[in-house]
Image: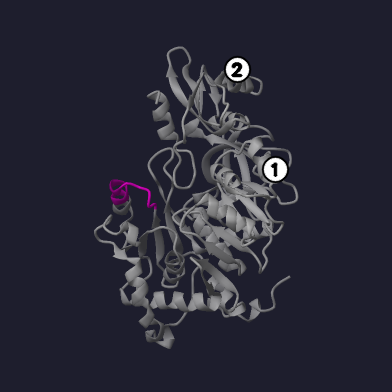
């Protein structure tokens, strides 16, 4: 049913979700951070002040502004303010080395660089977000009434994000406001949307998952409970207290949340999205026993986060679910023909969330298969395949099996060069007390073809993962080739 209030909105309000939320739900809580909350009416005032400040800095359509900061409200406010002047946000990963950051800036040439206090000095041209926060106040009343508009064109770039670079050099992906709005609508069509929704924002805002969550809240009129960073004990406490209804984690973060929890979680939780890698059956069972409504997902930056997600009423933990309503997934074989159910091929995606430069179908480079019901099982990046004796081995498939062992906390698989077979798989695991290598290999042999069973098992206290929780396969492979 269409909200009767929507039809009364001006075109400019229809095009800006935050302006729309401020008109429809002015006193509804839209953002929480560090013990303070903002209503949508208050957020609208703050965004307009920043828009005035940006205009006074000479910024306009086509400009991009880089941000180097931990999660903070200023980033969310800038996302909307930049959109209203036709400019875009370029969020940067705070965990990158200074040389890496400079290379990204050389590639993207932002008009301005802003940073939080912790990153001050890492980029010489950066301006302090804290200082700007103090400056914007006077622009609340200085902007002429004729310039007070909130138009955000769907084709205008909202954010430019660098892919994680887990398999190569980072690539810049430009996502439009239309992409983000479509992503929010597709997610809501699967999960539903309610005024009481509160999303826990612990994903970094330099990651598409974090930005998509912030955008989704404005589209739905929900609340973003923003945290500076992921902390397992903090997440467990917020989930347990019923402060939030939705969250998104990678499997390793979920395991840490479960370890930090004092007991079962309340029924007020509506969905916990899990992405970024395979989740073993023991972790899934443990999460569901604790009361977490876990839904597995598949997504990528080029398609503005979620592409496939389990349906809340059909979740079984065996797949990433079907394509979200409004999106299409197709598996293409080596001859670029549609593959039959169960056949592994390249995952391709079509729909309004796909970035504008992708063409008719986004060729993800990821391998996967669809079952008879259209549910997706992601297997690996094509570049990650291990070729052993002419046989292709998906590291993700082997990792799923290893992660299902009760004494394995985390698992990765990488190739090692071999004179006889070309390559052989080697497992790198984070063991639990009582772990036994031989028992793990026996477990793997009972579930995998012989050529897929790791030839060796190496143990680490922690696997190399990036800030988004994704396994850094290039680093893992280097560790394996050097035998740690």
Q: Nearer the viewer, residue 253 or 330?
A: 253
Q: Tell me the CA gap for discs 1 and 2.
A: 29 Å
- Vertical relation: 49 (above or below) 245: below
- Vertical relation: 439 (above or below) 145: above
Is 147 placed left or right of 15 in the picture? left
Which numbered dot is residue 338?
Answer: none
Mark 1 = which residue?
Answer: 374
**Residue 433 percent coordinates (x, y):** 56, 30
Mark 1 or mark 2, which is nearer to you? 2
Residue 124 appears in the rendering = yes
Mark 2 = which residue?
Answer: 450
Q: Residue furthest left?
A: 124
Disc 1 element: loop
**Residue 44 percent coordinates (x, y):** 50, 77
Q: Residue at x 51, y 68 (%)?
A: 35
Q: Residue at x 39, y 84 (%)?
A: 143
| Residue 99 inside the magenta-drawn segment | yes
Magenta span covers which residues?
93-103
């Amino acid at each position: 049913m269409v909200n009767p209030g929507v039809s009364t909105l001006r075109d400019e309000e229809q095009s800006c979700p935050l302006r729309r939320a401020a008109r429809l739900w002015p006193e509804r809580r839209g953002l929480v951070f560090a013990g303070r909350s903002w209503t949508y009416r208050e957020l609208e005032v703050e965004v307009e002040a920043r828009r005035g400040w940006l205009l006074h800095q000479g910024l306009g359509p086509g400009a991009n502004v880089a941000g180097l900061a931990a999660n903070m409200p200023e980033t969310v406010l800038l996302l909307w303010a930049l959109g209203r002047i036709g400019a875009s946000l370029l969020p940067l990963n705070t965990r990158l080395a200074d040389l890496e950051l400079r290379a990204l800036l050389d590639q993207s040439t932002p008009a301005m660089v802003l940073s939080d206090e912790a990153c001050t000095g890492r980029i010489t041209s950066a301006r302090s977000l804290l200082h700007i926060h103090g400056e914007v106040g006077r622009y609340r009343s200085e902007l002429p009434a004729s310039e007070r508009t909130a138009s955000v064109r769907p084709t205008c770039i909202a954010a430019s994000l660098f892919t994680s670079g887990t398999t190569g050099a980072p690539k810049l992906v430009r996502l439009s406001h239309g992409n983000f709005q479509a992503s929010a609508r597709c997610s809501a069509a699967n999960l539903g949307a309610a005024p009481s929704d509160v999303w826990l924002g612990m994903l970094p805002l330099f990651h598409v998952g974090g930005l998509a969550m912030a955008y989704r809240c404005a589209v739905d009129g929900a609340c973003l409970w923003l945290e500076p960073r992921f902390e397992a004990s903090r997440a467990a406490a917020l989930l347990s207290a019923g402060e939030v209804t939705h969250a998104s984690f990678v499997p390793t973060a979920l395991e840490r949340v479960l370890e930090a929890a004092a007991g079962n979680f309340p029924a007020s939780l509506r969905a916990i999205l899990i992405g970024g890698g395979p989740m073993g059956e023991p972790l899934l069972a443990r999460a569901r026993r604790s009361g977490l409504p876990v839904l597995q997902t598949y997504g990528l930056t080029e398609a503005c986060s979620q592409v496939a997600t389990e349906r809340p009423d059909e979740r079984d933990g065996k797949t990433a679910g079907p394509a979200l309503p409004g999106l299409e997934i197709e598996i293409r074989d080596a001859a670029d023909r549609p593959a039959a159910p169960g056949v592994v091929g390249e995952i391709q995606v079509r729909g309004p969330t796909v970035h504008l430069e992708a063409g008719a179908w986004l060729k993800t480079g990821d391998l996967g298969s669809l079952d008879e019901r259209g549910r997706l099982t992601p297997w690996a990046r094509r570049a990650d395949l291990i070729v052993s004796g002419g046989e292709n081995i998906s590291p993700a498939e082997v990792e799923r099996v290893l992660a299902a062992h009760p004494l394995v906390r985390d698992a990765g698989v990488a190739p090692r060069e071999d004179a006889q077979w070309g390559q052989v798989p080697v497992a790198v695991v984070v063991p639990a007390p009582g772990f036994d290598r031989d028992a793990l290999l026996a477990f793997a042999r009972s579930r995998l073809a012989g050529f897929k069973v790791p030839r060796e098992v190496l143990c680490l206290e922690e696997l190399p993962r990036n800030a988004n929780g994704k396994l850094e396969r290039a680093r893992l492979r280097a560790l394996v080739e050097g035998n740690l």
